[in-house]
Image (cartoon, rainbow, N blue to C red):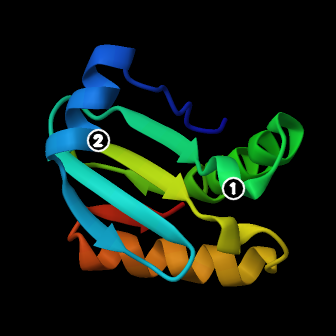
Amino acid sequence: MSQRIQGPSKKRFDEVYQTGRRFRGDFVTLIQSDGTGFIGIATSKKIGDKPERNFQKRRVKSILQSFQRTSAHDLIFVASIKTKGIKFETLRADLTQLIQEANINWGRK
């Protein structure tokens, strides 16, 4: 059974977005704050219309579900326009690098 990724409330999302520590990858930015373990996924409007932005969010979510999470940080992953057109494995490598850089205690399932 896959781990469910639950997003934060709008208020908490905005708080983490404004005050969290940022880690920039080639395609995704990770914003981290101490908290209860919520994950938010956002996209730049530059990516395109809503179906395209939702597609990029699903790609990020799919990668994150392949990790076993053991830390209690609130996280927001922001996909940039550069995610459009890259291979899934390239995006996976970028997210893995960000998670390691942020010292988030996640392991592969």
Measuring 30% from the left and 29% from the top, which residue is drawn there?
Answer: 14
Measuring 69% from the left and 84% from the top, which residue is drawn there?
Answer: 90
- Image label count: 2
Find disc 2 in the rendering and name its residue.
17
Left or right position of 97 against 109: left
The relative height of residue 96 versus residue 49 in the rendered view (above or below) is below
Find disc 1 in the rendering and name its residue.
46
User: From this viewpoint, is residue 73 visible?
Assistant: no
Q: Give SS at disc 1.
A: helix
Percent coordinates x, y for residue 57 in the rendering: 68, 46
User: From this viewpoint, is residue 41 visible?
Assistant: yes
Disc 1: CA contacts within 10 A as few (<14), some (14-19) or many (>=20)? few
Alpha carbon of mark 1 to alpha carbon of mark 2: how far? 18 Å
Question: Which numbered mark, 1 or 2, is in the foreground of this view?
Answer: 1
Measuring 35% from the left and 32% from the top, which residue is drawn there?
Answer: 38
Percent coordinates x, y for residue 41 in the rendering: 53, 42
Q: Which of the marked residues, 1 or 2, is nearer the chain's N terminus? A: 2
Q: Quadrant of residue 109?
A: bottom right
Amino acid found under the numbered disc labelled 2: Tyr
Amino acid found under the numbered disc labelled 1: Lys
Q: Quadrant of residue 47?
A: bottom right
Pick the quarter of the image with the N terminus: top right
- Residue farthest toward the front in the current orientation of the protein: 46
Measuring 33% from the left and 28% from the top, which residue is drawn there?
Answer: 13
The relative height of residue 14 versus residue 30 in the rendered view (above or below) is above
